[in-house]
Image: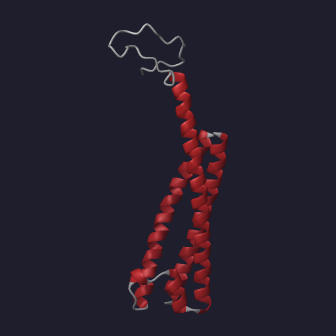
Amino acid sequence: MNQTVKMLEDILGREVEVYTNALEYAKKKQQALIKGDTEAIEAIVHSEEKLLGGIKELELSREKLITDAAGELALAAHDLTLKTLAAKIGGAQGISLLKKRTQLRHVIAQLADYNEQNRALIETHMKYTAFCMELLTGGMNSTNTYTNTGEASEEKASKHLLFDQKA
């Protein structure tokens, strides 16, 4: 059991490191979004993708170790959480597991906050881009070419557009 708990502590420590790196990328991405630096955003997203593969591996390893610990304690794996495992083993190892759990939850919460802020920034940029495209293509200046009776309208758009609406 001690070996399983030590391996679990190691995995949790590595997860905290990886999620902390993901948090740093989220902070950098936010600055790049604010500056409109698409090249930086692209580089950050590429780095994040590499990081996600590592997170998936660690999660699978952690789940396996929890299953192993549940077997050693004669408990159902789906009933065993880090909190209950820490309570079962007690002592310094239990306290260490709770500390790692708290660190991991804290970093993930911060990451979720930054991701939400970044999502809002991206949404704002997309709305602004759509608005600009409407202005450039004349989408906001709708003139009918036919009247309600089906007759050709004499009214024509007098503005010169930067982009033709037909692509």
Count every numbered label the image shows and give the total: 0
Out of 74 and 17, give the one closest to the viewer: 74
Q: Residue at x 66, y 43 (%)?
A: 34
Residue 92, above or below 41: below
Which of the 4 quarters of the picture holds residue 110? bottom right
The chosen color scheme is secondary structure
Question: Which percent across, then down, holds residue 103?
Answer: 62, 73
Q: Nearer the viewer, residue 65 or 70?
A: 70
Residue 166 found in image quarter:
top left
Q: Is residue 42 visible?
A: no
Residue visible at 52% across and 28% down? 133
Residue 97 in the image: above or below residue 120: below
Indicate whether 130 appears above or below 81.
Answer: above
* Image coordinates for residue 28, horizontal then vertical, percent: 65, 51
Look at 45% across and 80% down and name the residue there: 66
- Residue 124 visible within the image: yes
Q: Nearer the viewer, residue 79 or 131?
A: 131
Residue 116, percent from left and from top:
57, 55
